[in-house]
């Protein structure tokens, strides 16, 4: 019996020693990343007066440094292509936990997929794996069912296969991040033929996901509880504006939320030379859209933030 216990203790000790070897990969993984924004967020380095949050619509179409220059508000873009409202809620929660709270949050919504099932936008788990060395990130993965409680004590349980790739990553032409966090595109998508869609757009409320609607509600509540002015931003698609989607989003927002809706009478939004593809502006289009947003924010400032709407 003693021999069995001794052998068992020896095995457990050897296992824990071997397990700690994986710490090497866990702690070096962040150094391979080229987009450091999420790690900067949870280490308290994103302290700005105005924060842009969204998916690729926020990343491509809104240029944070242009807002900063035009309004005098220090501004940073925390938008991630392919991310959904649940991820945006996580970003805001992390922002408030580790950084000074902003005065303004601009939430760029995806028309029409913001609250619907989608293959193109999701909770970006892949962005959490490289920085799983942080307990906060590991706890988030546990809460989302991606890790179990063993990951609190075992490196082998915490590590992801992507952590083993320690090669330095590089920006692609499409995903280059400028110093303000924005990701404008200076070219048009290759081999993409598209034309302006004049057909009235639709929106099926019955397909909404409860978890996404709840995340949208929670996002608003966090802003409200922290005295942050939230503006929901509708940016252009290369098609007629979706008034049904706009109406639905407004139904789900509280009275403290403001809206910015692009000027859909502006002819440039019917000119494909200003677009990368049907859903994203090129840089020259993003500058025009952001300039509209700057003028709106300055008008809001002049009215004490009570106007809350532009079309």
Image (cartoon, helix red, strand yellow):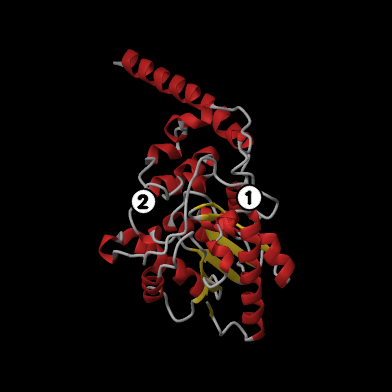
Residue that numbered label 1 is attached to: 40
Residue 32's label in the rendered image is none
* Residue in view at x 61 percent, y 65 percent: 289
SS at badge 2? loop
Q: Along the line of sight, which residue is nearer the eye, 106 or 89?
A: 106
Question: Where is residue 1, by image quadrant?
Answer: top left
Counting every numbered tag in the picture gives 2
Compared with 268, 257 (above or below) is below
State the separation of the CA atoms marked 1 and 2: 28 Å
Q: Are marks 1 and 2 in contact (CB under 8 Å)?
A: no
Q: Residue at x 45, y 40 (%)?
A: 152
Q: Residue 59: x percent and y percent?
A: 57, 54
Identify which residue, 28 or 193, lies in the foreground: 193
Pointer 2: what residue?
118
Q: Is 186 located above or below residue 305 in the figure?
A: above
The percent coordinates of residue 154 (x first, y second) are 44, 33
Q: Name the residue at the top extreme.
A: 3
- Is 307 placed left or right of 186 in the picture? left
Answer few, some or many: residues within 10 Å of disc 1's Cα (few below 14, many 20 plus, some between 14 and 19): some
Q: Judge whether residue 177 can be spotted in this image.
A: yes
**Residue at point 41%, 48% (across, down):** 120
Query: Horizontally, is 56 left or right of 212 in the view?
Result: right
Mark 1: which secondary structure?
A: helix
């Amino acid at each position: 019996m003693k021999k069995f216990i001794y052998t068992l203790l020896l095995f457990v000790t050897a296992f824990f020693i071997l397990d700690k070897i994986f710490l090497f990969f866990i702690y070096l993984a962040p150094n391979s990343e080229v987009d450091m924004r999420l790690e900067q967020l949870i280490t308290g380095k994103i302290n700005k007066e105005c924060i842009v949050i969204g998916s690729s619509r926020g990343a491509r179409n809104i240029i944070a440094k242009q807002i900063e220059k035009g309004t005098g508000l220090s501004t940073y873009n925390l938008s991630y292509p392919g991310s959904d409202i649940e991820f945006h809620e996580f970003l805001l929660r992390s922002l408030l936990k580790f950084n000074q709270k902003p005065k303004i949050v601009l939430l760029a919504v995806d028309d029409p997929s913001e609250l619907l099932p989608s293959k193109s936008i999701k909770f970006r788990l892949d962005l959490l794996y490289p920085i799983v060395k942080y307990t906060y990130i590991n706890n988030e993965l546990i809460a989302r069912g991606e890790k179990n409680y063993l990951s609190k004590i075992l490196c082998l349980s915490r590590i992801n296969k992507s952590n083993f790739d320690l090669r330095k990553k590089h920006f692609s032409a499409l995903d280059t991040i400028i110093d303000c966090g924005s990701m404008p595109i200076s070219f048009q998508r290759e081999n993409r033929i598209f034309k302006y869609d004049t057909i009235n757009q639709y929106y099926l409320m019955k397909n909404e996901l409860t978890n996404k609607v709840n995340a949208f509600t929670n996002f608003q509540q966090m802003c409200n509880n922290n005295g942050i002015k939230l503006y929901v931003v509708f940016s252009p698609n290369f098609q007629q504006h979706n008034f049904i989607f706009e109406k639905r989003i407004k139904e789900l927002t509280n009275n403290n939320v403001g809206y910015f809706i692009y000027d859909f009478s502006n002819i440039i939004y019917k000119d494909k030379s200003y677009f990368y593809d049907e859903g994203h502006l090129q840089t020259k289009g993003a500058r025009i859209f952001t300039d509209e947003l700057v003028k709106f924010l300055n008008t809001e400032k002049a009215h004490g933030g009570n106007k809350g709407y532009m079309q």
